[in-house]
Each structure stands twice: as structure tokens, then as C-alpha cells.
Amino acid sequence: MNSQHRPNSLRTFTIVWIGQVASILGSKMTNFAVLIWMWQLTGEVTPLSLLAFFNQIPILIAAAFAGVIIDYWNRKLMMIVGDVMAGLSTVIIFVLFLTGNLAIWHLYLTGAVNGLFGYLQELAFSASQALIVPKQHYVRVGAMGSMKTFGSGVLAPALAGVLYYIIGLSGILIIDFITFLIAIGTLTLVKIPQPKPSEVNQASTGKRWQQLTLGFRYLFNRPSLIALQLFALSYIFVDTASEVVAPMMLARSGNNTAVLGSVQGAVGLGGLIGAILLSLWGGPKRRIQGLLIGRALVFGGEMFLGLGRLPSIWMGANFGAGLFKPLANSCESAIWLSKVEPNVQGRVFAASSFLEGIISPLGLLIAGPLADYVFEPAMMPGGSLAPILGNVFGTGAGSGMALQLTLFSFIVVLICLGSYAFPVLRDIEDSLPDHDVEAKSA
């Protein structure tokens, strides 16, 4: 890294972070309010799931070319564009709602636009962190990112749930628009440096296809990063487990939405506290330890969600799982930031997102059928597994999903602990030099 670009404080990151905290809080409040509006309008779950689908699909498509855009275009401008497009979407929804013309397909369209530009914005911010954050604070800023995510996850539903019945959807949309203005304002106050071209870039200039595939080639030329990527691809089991959490709790609590909200709030509270503690601590010296042990502890907690039958146990298990999520997520982010050169991080991170985006939806696709046609029937009275596991998970509605959650969470724990047997991943911090070390030796 060039010395003129070597950051010496968290000032720039903190200013941008404050704006992003406001923005994500407003966005999650709007998302919560929109879900209530859609549920009141249709009374069906399918439109809600389709909204999430249309929000995610553009990300998979964009990941194929987004890295080139981020590495060559002005990253600060891309971040501002992301907030501007989100603000415009909010204005469009607001106008359509006030005129009585808002339809569900409008939300699908604006959700796709927000998904695309939100992804580009987040990618630009992630790829800029190595240029605005001192290396010793990588884990700490990861913790601040978790504080942003989990803090808004606690506050947004609570605020939107109260305000929706006071100021309605239109009032929440106005608040959302104000938060976008705050985010844009903070970006105008800082300078986001652009990375200088390196040999990695120069070796592939002149051919568009080489630029598009550079991120993939960068990964495949570094076995340790491939090992880290393969570890991430194992999250197919994460989705297979986590997708049944909400319906399992509703089924086992008699459709008590208050219980569901309390349990979901517990993971947000745990994550917020974990992020605060991590930001004060700074994280372990061996970041791979924080990733593997942290993620094993997260899904150890998820196992107790399936094994428990009382709301108090669910809340405790979810709080514990949330407590360790910032540790695992921040350590993983710190490894990527320290090992990948800043001027190609856009393309490398996009390639990583693309690979995860291909595999991850498979977990979502199989989770429902497994629950509906395999585990739930097997754990009903008289089912094939009820005589064997009925004493552990009970029988009846939700018991099969509890088994599914516990089983696939246990698989994730085994993957985390088993990863210690592979030196290419376990020793990644020793075998693969940090990008600034490579630059000095060159």
C-alpha cells in the first residue's frame, strides 16, 4: 500500500459508519412497515417471500461484473449513488402510496433496484476499508459493522411497530428518506482514496474478459483463499437450518407472534452486546481462531433452539448465538481485508459473493421441502423417527423442524471444528502474507 494512502485513524470510517447506521435503520423500518402493509393487504406469505427473492436476485447477477466497476470507478461516488437510488425508491413508494396507486409489483421492482445498488454500495464500502482503516483495527471495524446490523435489528422493528400505528407507512417512509439524506451528507464530508494500479491490474489490462475474471483467478491462485471460500460455501447447511427457525417457533408456540418477536430480538441484543465487547477488545491475534471457534459457538447456540421447548430457552440460546456472531463475522472480514490487495478487492470480493450466491440459495430451496415432506412427517405421532427421537424433540407440529435445525446446526459445528485438520485453512495467516507485507517486499 502506498504510504500516502496509509490510514492512521478511524475518523473517516467512523463518519461514514454513522451515516450508514442512520440509513440502515431507516431502511429496516421501511422494510418492516412494508411487510405489515403487504400482510394486511394479502394475508399471504408468498408475496413476502417473493419480495426477498427480487431483492436478492440482482445481487447474483451484478456480482459477475460489479468488481470491475468498483475497482475502476470512483468508490465514494458509487456509495453516494447507492444512497441516492434508495432515496428515490422511497420517494416513488411514498408518492404511489399517497395517490392510492401502490401495488405489490411496485415493491418487487423497487426491491430489485435497492438490492442492486445496495450491493454495489456495500461492495464499494468494503473494498475501501483497507484504504481508510489502520490494519490493527480491522477486527474492530468489523465489530462496528456488526453493531450497525444488530443494533438496527433490535431498534427498527420496535420503532416501526410502534410508529406504524401512529404515523402509518407514509410517516415511516419520510423518516427513511431523512436517513438517506444523513448518509449522503456524511459521505460528502470525507475523502475516500482510490487505489493505485498494481502489477496485478497491469498484468490483465487490455482484455475485458480478463478484467471480469480477475477476481476468480486471484482466488484460484491462492490455495488459502480458496480454502476460506470453500468454508464459506459450507453455509448451505446454515441456510438449511436457519430457514426453519421462525416457522418452528410459531408451530411450537401456537402461532404466538409475540414469542417470535422476543426470540428474534434476543439474537439482535446478543449481537449488539457482542459487537460492543469486540470493539473494546479488538479481537484475537489469530483471526482464524475467532472465525472457526466463533462460528462453532454460534451454531452450538442454534442447536439449543431445536433442543429447547420453552420460549425462555429459545431466547437464551438465540442471545448466546448472537453474542458470538460479531466475533466470527469480524474475524472473517479482517482476514479478507488483510490478505487481498485494496486495488483488486472489488473484483475479488465480487467473485466471492458470486460463488456464495450460487450455492447459498440451494439451502433455501431444500429447507422447506425437507421440513414439509421429510422431518415433520417423520416426527409426527406414528412417524418413522418419533419412537427414536420423540423423547428428545417431542412429537407433533414443529418437532421435525426442531430436529432439522439441530441436525444441520450440528453439521456446521463439525465443519468448524474439523477445519482445524486442514493446514491450508488453519494456517492461512502464516502461509499467505498480508498485502502490505507483499508490497514492502516488492
Image (cartoon, rainbow, N blue to C red):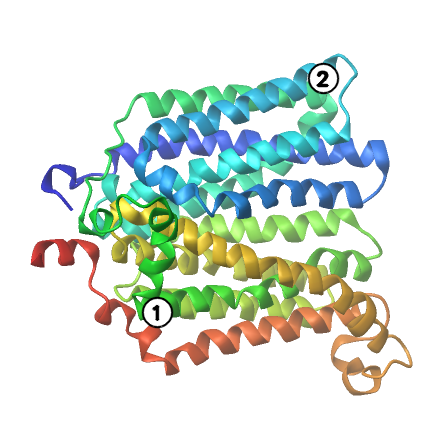
Q: Mark 1: which amino acid?
A: Gln
Please tell me the numbered disc located at residue 221. none
Marks 2 and 1, how far apart at CA: 50 Å
Q: Is residue 134 left or right of residue 229?
A: left
If you read the primary sequence from the N terminus, does the residue marked by circle 2 or circle 1 appear first?
Answer: 2
Say if 19 sits above or below 431 in the image. Answer: above
Label 2 crowd bin: few (<14), some (14–19), many (20+), radius 10 Å: some
Measuring from the top left, give residue 52's x and y in whole percent.
66, 43
Can you say whether 103 is above or below 355 in the image? above
Circle 2: residue type: Leu
Q: Which residue is mark 1?
A: 289
Name which residue lies at 56% across and 61% down: 359
Q: Give percent across and percent down for residue 287.
A: 31, 64
| Residue situated in front as seen by the camera: 56 or 421 | 56
The mark total stands at 2
Marking on residue 96: 2
For the view shown, which residue lies furthest in the right direction? 382
Of residues 211 and 188, which is closer to you in this image?
Answer: 211
Residue at the spot x=64%, y=51% of the render? 264
